[in-house]
Amino acid sequence: MWEAQESGRRSAADPGWTPGCKGSFPWQAKMVSRHNLTTGATLINEQWLLTTANNLFLNHSENATAKDIAPTLTLYVGKKQLVEIEKVVLHPNYSQVDIGLIKLKQKVPVNERVMPICLPSKDYAEVGRVGYVSGWGEMPILNLLTI
């Protein structure tokens, strides 16, 4: 089980922090798959990232294995830091549970631009609390969600 970390906590109280500016989400990695499709992954510790199985399967057949997928990905963390992938792990029931893990060959150095995401406690969500979503892509804002 993963332990929550305090080190990745960012807030509007931090000087110069603005949602959406470069470095706002130091746990967000850029993943480029075959044919230059860009998706995201989240650094959950110094050597593992979490993403969707769907992101990992972009431009692969449904028969592709994790070993087929890993060499076709390029992964960046922080300020264009290219990191090497050791392996990809898919949830055993990934067609129903859209989760995949990426293990890096080496741990990434943690600094202000690269740090694991903080995992909230189960009691973290409360009415009126602001949350942020990060990643790549474009989507019209339909409405704001509240907890």
Image (cartoon, rainbow, N blue to C red):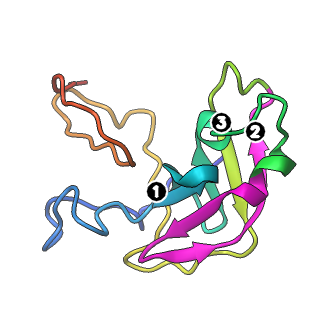
State the mark number for residue 62.
none
Circle 3 Cα neighbour tier, 10 Å, few/some/many (<14 / 14–19 / ≥20) = many
Residue 81 pos. (x, y %): 52, 78
Residue 35 pos. (x, y %): 59, 51
Residue 122's image quarter? top left
What's the residue at 13%, 73% (across, down)?
Answer: 15
Determine the secondary structure under disc 2: strand
Of residue 40 and residue 5, the one placed in the foreground of this image is 40
What's the residue at 59%, 40% (across, down)?
Answer: 55
> What residue type is disc 1 on?
Ile
What's the residue at 61%, 68% (across, down)?
Answer: 46
**Residue at mark 1:** 117
**Residue at mark 3:** 53
Residue 81 colored in magenta in the image = yes
Locate the C terminus and report the quarter of the image it occupies: top left
> What residue type is disc 3 on?
Ala
Distance from disc 1 to disc 3, alpha carbons, whole Å, reads 19 Å
Residue 3 in view here? no
Q: Are marks 3 and 2 in contact (CB under 8 Å)?
A: yes
State the mark number for residue 90.
2
Q: Which residues are magenta?
A: 70-92
Residue 49 colored in magenta in the image = no
